[in-house]
């Protein structure tokens, strides 16, 4: 039976708790709801992220919204509707907003400073699982952080590869398995949110 690197090296993989760890929502922007970047299962992922966000606010968690600023004016235009944060997940007054231009949310941003000292934990949800979520979570390890990724509050899309298509569901499962091997604790929203 395969084992994760965390298991092989005896590393604890206990999920972070709402109220103690900051919640980082990555690229929850309208461009993922329709058009060329529409994500598979995005409606369910937005609903799960919304439940997570509501619970985080109820528990007094620090909330950090990371948003992508596009560079070509066509996607992630922060002054247009596509770059705006999805209404259900929009920041409230006092919640931090970190703007990035690369997949890794830590690259040339204030994300690390916004996280502050929270025991090396953070809770992560958002889009796309294989790209900005993965890049940010993997980079977190370099800063001594162990993220908790909320699987059903993430989503991705079909990708072309080697003359075929890798289905979003396959890519999602593989990316989450890769993160759970060493870089993150991967859970479902029900494991963190009290109904």
Image (tube, grey):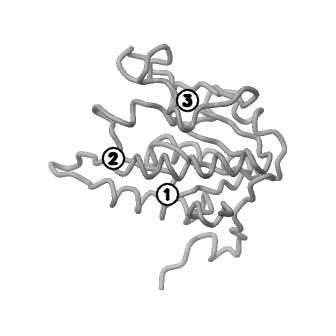
Q: Nearer the viewer, mark 1 or mark 2?
A: 1
Check the image and report above or below for 74 versus 17: above
Residue 116 position within the rendered picture, expressed as x and y whole percent measured from the top left = 81, 39
Q: Residue furthest left?
A: 163
Q: Would you place residue 48 above or below residue 106 in this image?
A: below
Measured as percent of width and height from the top left, residue 35 is found at: 29, 31
Marks 1 and 2, how far apart in space?
A: 14 Å
Residue corresponding to mark 1:
152
* Above or below, comparing residue 30 to residue 40 in the picture: above
Residue drawn where x is 64% and y is 27% of the image? 98
Q: Which residue position holds label 2?
A: 157
Horizontal and vertical percent for residue 103? Answer: 50, 35
Element type at mark 2: loop
**CA–CA distance in space, label 3 to label 1:** 19 Å
**Residue topped by disc 3:** 67
Query: In terms of image quadrants, where is residue 170?
Result: bottom left
Mark 2 vs mark 3, CA separation in Å = 18 Å
């Amino acid at each position: 039976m395969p084992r994760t690197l965390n298991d092989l090296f005896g590393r604890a993989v206990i999920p972070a708790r709402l109220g103690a760890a900051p919640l980082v929502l990555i690229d929850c922007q309208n461009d993922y709801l329709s058009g060329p970047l529409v994500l598979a299962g995005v409606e369910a992922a937005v609903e799960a992220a919304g439940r997570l966000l509501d619970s985080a606010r109820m528990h007094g968690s620090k909330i950090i919204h990371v948003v992508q600023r596009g560079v070509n004016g066509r996607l992630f235009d922060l002054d247009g509707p596509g770059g705006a944060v999805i209404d259900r997940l929009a920041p409230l007054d006092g919640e931090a907003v970190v703007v990035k231009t690369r997949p890794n949310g830590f690259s040339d941003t204030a994300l690390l400073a916004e996280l502050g000292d929270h025991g090396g934990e953070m809770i992560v949800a958002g889009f796309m699982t294989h790209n900005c979520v993965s890049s940010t979570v993997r980079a977190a390890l370099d800063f001594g952080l162990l993220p908790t990724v909320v699987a059903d509050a993430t989503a991705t899309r079909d990708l072309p590869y080697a003359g075929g298509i890798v289905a979003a569901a396959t890519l999602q499962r593989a990316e989450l398995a890769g993160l759970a091997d060493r870089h993150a604790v991967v859970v479902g929203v029900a494991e963190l949110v009290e109904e």
